[in-house]
Image (cartoon, rainbow, N blue to C red):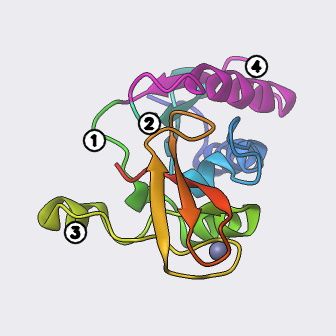
Amino acid sequence: MVSLAASETDERLQRARAAIADVSDPEIPVLTLGDLGVIRDIGLEEGGIIEVTITPTYSGCPAMKVMEFDLATALAKAGFAEARIRTALAPAWTTDWMSEAGKEKLRAYGIAPPAGKASRRALFGAETALTCPRCGSGKTTKISEFGSTACKAQWRCDACLEPFDAFKCI
Ligand SMILES: [Zn+2]
């Protein structure tokens, strides 16, 4: 059990939250890990050690080690040198965990955010056409399952003819 006074516990948790608030996704620097929905929990372990639980966007995501390192570094800078980063694989991350602010940032960055709900896609099986992040046209075609990173697919806009990355819906 945590032996600290309740107010001190809150204060430490708040400082830890603030410390990792700006840690960004290694592959999409405009997104914070919070925007992405990767950070599941921040808690205090025995002795007041901060433990952050993260869930990878998909298992085997090569960016995960970088995320862990960046989080640990941010926490160490804020005075939590002993912080632990724990990876939880269940429940599995879905694009539904991405915040609306995160989707907006993706669009502004030129990457089409995931459309709709993962559960709905699973139900209907079909992939809906994405909106072009550059011109806003709904006439888009998927070119390849593989974009600049494994987390993204490559699409092309049929209106402005620009190719763009799209965040894969999982
Ligand atoms: Zn376009």
Label 2 secondary element: loop
Q: Which residue is disc 3 drawn over?
A: 120
Q: Quick one: 78 or 110, which is closer to the camera?
A: 110
| Mark toward the start of the polypeptide (3 vs 2) | 2
Q: Tell me, yes or no, whether the highlighted magenta stretch contains residue 76.
A: yes
Q: Which mark is residue 81?
A: 4
**Where are the magenta residues, as a range?**
59-88
Q: Is mark 3 within 8 Å of ligand 1?
A: no
Residue 74: x, y in percent? Answer: 79, 32
Q: Quick one: 135 or 109, which is closer to the camera?
A: 135
Mark 3 residue type: Arg
Mark 1 residue type: Pro
The Cα–Cα distance between marks 2 and 4, rounded to whole angstroms, is 21 Å
The Cα–Cα distance between marks 1 and 3, rounded to whole angstroms, is 18 Å
Q: Which residue is disc 1 drawn over?
A: 91
Mark 4 residue type: Ala
| Mark toward the start of the polypeptide (1 vs 4) | 4
- Which quarter of the picture shows residue 19? top right
Q: Which mark is residue 123?
A: none
Ligand 1 quadrant in view: bottom right
| Mark toward the start of the polypeptide (2 vs 4) | 2
Assess disc 1: are there few (<14), some (14-19) or many (≥20) residues with their C-alpha within 10 Å of its C-alpha: few
